[in-house]
Amino acid sequence: MAEPQFRTPKGTHDVLPEDHQYMTYIKKAVRHRARQAGYKRIDPPIFENRAIFERGIGEHTDIVEKELFIVSGKQRTEESESDVQFALRPEITAGICRSYIEHGMHLLPQPVELYAIGQCFRYDRPQKGRYRQFHQVDLELIGLKDPSLDAQLIHVCMNIFADLRIADRLTLQLNNIGNAENRRAFLVALKDFFIGKERHLPELDRKRLQTNPLRLLDSKEEDTRILLKSAPTLDQFIDDDSKQYHATLVEYLDELGVKHTANPSLVRGLDYYGQTVFEFWDSSSGAQNAVGGGGRYDGLIELLGGQPTPGVGVAMGVERMIWHMKQAGVTVPNKDHVDVFVAQLGPDAKKMCLTLIAKLREKGVHTIGALGEASLKSQMRLADKFGAKFTLLLGQMEVKEGKIILRDMAAGKQKSIKFENAVEEVLKLLGSENLDTYTLRDHFDED
Ligand code: HAM
């Protein structure tokens, strides 16, 4: 076959029907667990004013420095026109916080619990589990601060992972990075420590020491890790309030039966965090491909122009969850199967089949057919390829006799029945529990 002329851009992929079965399953689990815990769905736009991410996530983070997809646009008023820069969202938290401020959600009963599912974009170097377009499930709890909220949020994630049958493949890494003052004092001490030692640091970390020294803590570079062994540690600078907060959170997680691992080097790659931070790591490969991560961001809403408002949240990578489900051998129901293929020959038969197909579909039977002008034999072959459970055949003879042939594809047996009984017969054979009927409520669940 010739090479296709066009392919998906590097780092992106088509979500093919096979993967959509997993995606739908994940979305259902998330909706179910989120609703149980009082979260409501929100969908901020996929692009926002670039400054929201720069200010929120931090100018010297990898995400903002290297990974933003910038979209240029024009802002027009009656009098003037100016250039404006948007960015495709690299995450959903900053957009949700912007929305909280814009819609005056501080007037609602607090905490406001919101969740979102959707695409995010990071112009990262693509590799296994790391894409330029990917999907996140995001949960945010805004407007109230208490360790019981952090614990409940983490518990909701654990329930989602358990529903997807991947919980035992993941470990929860937990840390408290103190308040802004604690981190400032620590960073002064860390920078002092590295004076005269810079040349031992790999280039990337030498730069980080200047722009975002906290990230040195989770550096993967061997030389940096060796130096860090004798460097001051963040926990020496954490104040008593943060320590107490963390101790209570740990107590609550234990109460809820959530297993966790203390990880003093966990700092996360976004600047808006303070106090609680956590990540769900692949138990076998560690930090490289975290399935989810989050933490507390009590300063973010103020940074974006709102009143000081606490918040805690988490995001989980959908592609990484799917990968784990496949690794764990988890299969999900395939709802795209074909129940009935309707084969026909001749213009009269084709016309009759159209209404027959419509009636079957209305009753919840997955039906395809009456497709073209091919012979009955080749239509039968097609029915087989589509994996249809039953085939209904209407030839010229059957039209004359008011009959139709019903064939059980697996058993290879067929019988002639009255045309008017066809729908009823099929329903009986499939069983009412296998019919795909929907009420409006289910319909809302699908997208
Ligand atoms: P994050 O750790 O940057 O946190 O991303 C969360 C999850 O998104 C990651 O654990 C990973 O599963 C997935 N992910 C991130 N980048 C990629 C990528 N390039 N390809 C595939 N999957 C990826 C946040 O985004 C924060 N907003 C989480 C949060 C919510 N904090 C508070 N509220």
Image: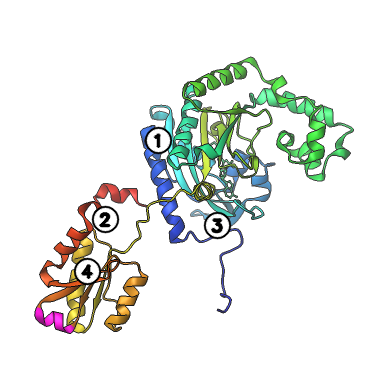
Mark 1: give few (<14), some (14-19) or many (20+) Cα within 10 Å.
many
* Residue 74, label in figure: 3
Question: How much space separates mark 3 and mark 4, taking CA atoms?
Answer: 50 Å
Mark 4: give few (<14), some (14-19) or many (20+) Cα within 10 Å.
many
SS at circle 1: loop
Q: Earlier in the sequence, mark 3 or mark 4?
A: 3
Main secondary structure type of the part rendered in magenta: helix
* Residue 39, label in figure: 1
Q: Residue at x 63, y 15 (%)?
A: 240
Q: Earlier in the sequence, mark 1 or mark 3?
A: 1
The amino acid type, in three-letter code, at marker 2 is Asp
Which color scheme did the rendering employ for the protein?
rainbow
Question: How much space separates mark 1 and mark 3, taking CA atoms?
Answer: 35 Å
Q: Can residue 425 be seen at all in this image of the molecule? A: yes
Q: Is residue 45 magenta?
A: no
* Residue 436, label in figure: 2
Q: Earlier in the sequence, mark 2 or mark 4?
A: 4
SS at circle 2: loop
Q: Residue at x 15, y 67 (%)?
A: 422
Q: Residue at x 40, y 29 (%)?
A: 107
Q: Is residue 159 or residue 241 the one in the foreground?
A: 159
* Residue 398, label in figure: none
Question: How much space separates mark 2 and mark 4, taking CA atoms?
Answer: 14 Å
Determine if the C-beta at disc 2 is less than 8 A from ligand 1: no
* Residue 357, label in figure: 4
Residue numbers of the magenta segment: 396-401
